[in-house]
Amino acid sequence: MSFSQVDLLSRSLRTVALAAVLGSGCTLGCYTYVPSQASYLQPGREVALDINDLGRVNLNAQIGAEVARVAGILQQQTGTDYTIKVSELTYLNGRTAMWSGEPVTIRNDYVGSVLEKKLSPGKTAAAVVASAGVVGGAI
């Protein structure tokens, strides 16, 4: 192989790697939490529970102080509570803490609103356009 062929191959590989990184990052950002319209949610769904003041006081020993939102995979929903494998906590100050799927049971009266993770068409379109522009510019 000549130097120019190696250089071209190297640039092509860098472009593909850049596209893969940007594409995967944009895909992860294409989801958003929306208020749930269902009274009963299927286990296995990604959900977020907005915690009210009563919940913050009573869940302090389990999940810590000043938690605004608990997000994760719904394990079970009964008439009185939700059990979720927690993946993320969002605090009142906007900071987040990642968890590794520890199950937490949260009573219905501790929840202000229930949200489901859904694909966001607007974010997806923006991510596709941005990725195409970056990849096109790199090429």
Image (cartoon, rainbow, N blue to C red):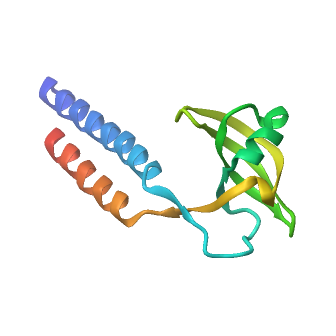
Which quarter of the image is occupied by the C terminus?
top left
Q: Is residue 1 visible?
A: no
103 or 3: which is nearer to us?
A: 103
In the shown orientation, is residue 22 left or right of residue 90? Answer: left
Q: Residue at x 83, y 41 (%)?
A: 58
Q: Is residue 37 above or below residue 83?
A: below
81 or 10: which is nearer to us?
A: 81
Q: Residue at x 54, y 32 (%)?
A: 93
Which quarter of the image is occupied by the N terminus?
top left
Total labels drawn: 0
Instruction: Residue 65: give x, y in percent of width and height.
Output: 72, 31
Q: Is residue 89 visible?
A: yes
In the shown orientation, is residue 33 left or right of residue 41? Answer: left
Q: Residue at x 12, y 28 (%)?
A: 4
Instruction: Residue 110: give x, y in percent of width and height.
Output: 77, 53
Q: Residue at x 43, y 46 (%)?
A: 24
Q: Is residue 120 above or below residue 56?
A: below
Instruction: Residue 113: give x, y in percent of width and height.
Output: 64, 60
In the shown orientation, is residue 38 left or right of residue 55? Answer: left
62 or 76: which is nearer to us?
A: 62
Q: Is residue 4 above or below residue 81?
A: above
Toward which corner of the image does residue 30 lie, by quadrant? Answer: bottom left
Instruction: Residue 117: give x, y in percent of width and height.
Output: 57, 60
Q: Residue furthest front?
A: 53
Q: Residue furthest top?
A: 3
